[in-house]
Amino acid sequence: MLKIQKHDEGLATVGNDDYQVGVFAYTGLGKVVLVTSRKGESWILPKGNRAKKRSDRLQAKREAFEEAGLQGSLNCKYYDFNFSGKSKNLRIYTMKVKTMLNDFPEMRQRKRMVTTFDRAEKMVKQEYLEIIRELRKRIF
């Protein structure tokens, strides 16, 4: 289920860790950026746990940099994805990529791919498929 929210700069509070934050990163040429999970088992969107002293928006931007070497502008609006049976839900911010660095903190732990939406939809697991399809419609 997709729930659209307005911009929120609130900091994480103790015990408020029922969701992760991440980015739906896309290029000016209409492609999406994926990374592998830490174990390399699947293709995912850059995401991570909330930070207690950082807004969700800034944490999402940090995850994009650490996991994929991405820099760009983040939209203020975010999208909450709630999945039944999952321990954590996802809060996704959209990012138009300006720069893709070749040197980034997790470059030895993850692979990065810039690909078409059609190809991405065939490569990701069901929950990411829903996110990609929904945000593709909203952005393009």
Image (spheres, helix red, strand yellow):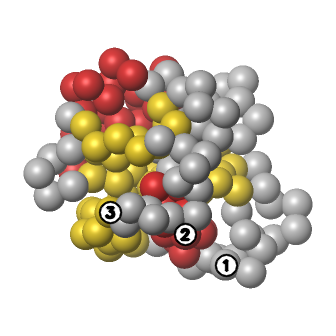
Neighbourhood count class around disc 2 (C-alpha, 10 Å): few under 14, some 14–19, many 20 upward: many
The residue positioned 35% from the left and 54% from the top of the image is 25
| Residue 7 image offset from top left, x and y in percent | 46, 71
Secondary structure beneath disc 1? loop
Q: Is residue 139 above or below residue 14?
A: above
The front one of 132 and 1 is 132
Q: In the rendered view, does 135 fall on the left or right side of 55?
A: left
- Tell us which disc is closer to us: 1 or 3: 3
Which badge, 1 or 3, is on the more N-terminal residue? 1
| Res 103 seen here | yes
Residue on which disc 1 sits = 54
97 vs 24, nearest the viewer: 97
Measuring from the top left, give residue 56's x and y in whole percent. Answer: 60, 69
Task: Say what amino acid the circle numbered 1 marks.
Answer: Arg
* Residue identifier under label 3: 100
N-term-proximal mark, 1 vs 2:
1
